[in-house]
Image (cartoon, grey):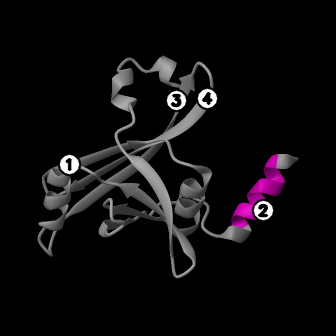
């Protein structure tokens, strides 16, 4: 949904940066967590917990750049809610499509948390993605 149609625009201000790291030559989508309070909360979660997560894309209209795509990643672990608003690169989006994973890392590139995204909204394989690109060009 374009941001000019959303009433609470400040809800979509960037809160975190995204990055793509390579683990065993495989690109993975990472969100950089600098808030030490959030890092401590994530690390202190018990071994048994209930997770709910959602990833939602949106468009923002920028005067000089034009339309840019952002996404909002919400993560609820037991009663704790974490929310990340980022304007990721295409590499970040591609790595989510192919791996269906998001990693939350700290400034030193250490993994704090990882989340598998189970959804039929993403194309499942690279070959499916290539077929989709061919269909969309016609």
Decide which of tag 1 and tag 3 comes sooner along the chain.
Answer: 3
In-front residue for pair 117/114:
114
The residue depicted at 19 percent of the width and 64 percent of the height is: 50
In-front residue for pair 54/65:
65
Decide which of tag 4 and tag 3 comes sooner along the chain.
Answer: 3
What mark, if any, has residue 67 been given in the picture? 4
What mark, if any, has residue 131 been given in the picture? 2
Image location of residue 99, percent across then percent down: 52, 69
Decide which of tag 4 and tag 1 comes sooner along the chain.
Answer: 4
Residue 84 quadrant: top left
The residue depicted at 61 percent of the width and 29 percent of the height is: 67
Per the image, the residue denoted by label 3 is: 1
Decide which of tag 2 and tag 3 comes sooner along the chain.
Answer: 3
- Gap in angstroms between the C-alphas marked 2 and 4: 26 Å
Q: Secondary structure at mark 3?
A: loop
Image location of residue 78, percent across then percent down: 15, 58
The residue depicted at 57 percent of the width and 78 percent of the height is: 25
What mark, if any, has residue 119 been given in the picture? none
Viewer-nearest of discs 1 and 2:
1
The reply to whether dot 1 and dot 2 touch (C-beta < 8 Å) is no
Q: Residues within 10 Å of mark 4 (few under 14, many from 20)?
A: some
Q: Secondary structure at mark 4?
A: strand
- Gap in angstroms between the C-alphas marked 1 and 3: 23 Å
Per the image, the residue denoted by label 1 is: 81
Residue extent of the magenta highlight:
128-136
- Gap in angstroms between the C-alphas marked 2 and 3: 26 Å
Residue 116 quadrant: bottom left
Viewer-nearest of discs 1 and 3:
1
Q: Secondary structure at mark 2?
A: helix
- Gap in angstroms between the C-alphas marked 4 and 1: 29 Å
Decide which of tag 1 and tag 2 comes sooner along the chain.
Answer: 1
Decide which of tag 2 and tag 4 comes sooner along the chain.
Answer: 4
């Amino acid at each position: 949904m374009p941001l000019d149609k959303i009433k609470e625009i400040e809800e979509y201000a960037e809160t975190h940066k995204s990055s793509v790291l390579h683990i065993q030559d495989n690109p993975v989508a990472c969100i950089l967590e600098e808030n030490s309070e959030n890092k401590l909360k994530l690390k202190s979660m018990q071994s048994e917990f209930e997770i709910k997560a959602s990833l939602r894309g949106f468009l923002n209209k920028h005067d000089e750049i034009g339309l840019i795509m952002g996404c909002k990643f919400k993560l609820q672990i037991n009663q704790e809610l974490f929310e990340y608003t980022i304007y990721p690169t295409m590499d970040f989006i591609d790595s989510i499509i192919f791996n269906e994973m998001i990693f939350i890392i700290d400034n030193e590139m250490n993994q704090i948390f990882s989340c598998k995204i189970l959804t039929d909204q993403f194309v499942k394989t690279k070959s499916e993605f290539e077929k989709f690109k061919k269909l969309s060009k016609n």
